[in-house]
Image (tube, helix red, strand yellow):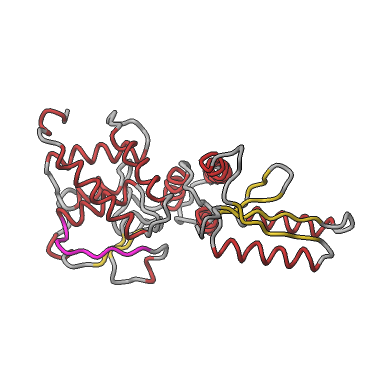
Amino acid sequence: MRGDSKWLLLVFTLPSSKASERVRIWRKLQKFGSIPFRNAGSFLPNTLENQERFEWLATAIRASKGEASILQVSSIDDMSADTLQEQFRKARDADYTKLIKDLRKLKPSAKGPSSQVLRFRRRFEEIVAIDFFTSPSRSKAGEALAQAEQTGMKSRLIERGSVSRTKYQKRTWITRPHPGIDRVSSAWLISRFIDARPKFIFGSDPAKHPNAIPFDMFQGVGFGHEGDQCTFETLCIAFDVSDKRVLLIAQVIHDADLEDGKFGRHEGHAMNQILRGWASQNISDDQLLQRGIDLIEGFYNSISQPEDTLP
C-alpha cells in the first residue's frame, strides 16, 4: 500500500445511451478484482498497479462521454479496514468455490490432464493475482486443481528410501509462489534433513528451470502429492526420514493441508493462519518461506517427547 491512503475508489457515470460501454467497464472492474462500495463506486487496494488500472478505466469512461474520478481513501468512518478486507476475501472465496465446483464436473481422462484443465489452471492463477488478502479457499482450490491435473496419470507412489540424498545436495528447488503450509514445511524438511545447502525459487512453470527440483507443483512433476499423501509426507518417504518428531509433524501438515481429519491433528491449522497473516502483509515469497521455515523449526524443537504423542 502507498502512503496513508490504503484504498482507491473509482466513481463514474456514463450516459444512458452507453449501455454496452457500461457493461464493458463493469466486466473490467470484475477482472481487476474490485468490489462495489454501496452505490458510490468500486474499491481496490491502493497499489501502483491498481492505480494504473483505474486510470485506464477512467480514460476509457471519459472517451465515452462519461465522467470519472479516482479517490484515494485512508479510512471509512463506519467501516474498518478489516471489514473491507473481508469483503475482498469473500469475493475471491466465491471465485474459488465456483472453480472447485467446475473442476469436480471434469470426467477422468486416460490421456492425463486435458486442455480444459490447463484453462482451469490459468483461471486459478488469474484469481490468485487479484486475491489481495488471501482468501482461505485459495489452498482448497489449489488442491482441487492439482488433483484434476493428476487425473488419468499412472500412479507413481514412491517407495520408502527410493531416492538417494547424495544426488540432491546443493540443488535449486522450485515451488509455486505464495507458499502455504505444505510448501513451507517441505522446504524446512529439505533444508533440515535432505539438502544441506538448498536454494529455493518460485515459479509456475518448472520447465523454465530444467535444473531445478520441483516440489508441490501443479504439473505432477518432481515431489508432490502422491495418493492421499501431501508433499511433506512424500518427501519423508522418498528420502526415508524416520525422525519421530518429523513423523508427528507429517501428521500435522497432512491434516492442515488436506483437511481430511485423518490424524486428528489441529496444530497445523493455527500455523496456516499465521502464514496467511504474514502473506497479507505483502512480504516477498522469500521472506514468507523463511518465516515459515522458522515456524516449523520452532514447532519441531517444541516437541520434546514424540514417543508420547505419536499413536
111 sits to left or right of 305: right
Q: Position of residue 97 (x, y in %)?
A: 54, 41
Q: Residue at x 22, y 52 (%)?
A: 188
Q: Position of residue 261 (x, y in %)?
A: 33, 30
Q: Position of residue 236 (x, y in %)?
A: 20, 48
Q: Residue at x 88, y 54 (%)?
A: 16
Q: Residue at x 63, y 63 (%)?
A: 53
Q: Residue furthest right?
A: 17
275 sits to left or right of 74: left
Can residue 88 be seen?
A: yes
283 sits to left or right of 108: left
Q: Is 36 or 118 nearer to us in this picture?
A: 36
Is 198 included in the stretch rendered in magenta? yes
Can residue 116 be seen?
A: no
User: Measured along the vertical axis of the image, is residue 268 above or below residue 54?
Assistant: above
Q: Is 235 or 15 nearer to us in this picture?
A: 15
Q: Quadrant of the C terminus?
A: top left
Q: Position of residue 57 (x, y in %)?
A: 70, 63
User: Measured along the vertical axis of the image, is residue 211 above or below residue 98?
Assistant: below
Q: Which quadrant of the view contains residue 247?
A: top left
User: Measured along the vertical axis of the image, is residue 311 above or below residue 21?
Assistant: above
* Number of dots carrying numbers: 0
**Residue extent of the magenta highlight:** 194-202
Is 170 included in the stretch rendered in magenta? no
Q: Which quadrant of the view contains residue 19?
A: bottom right
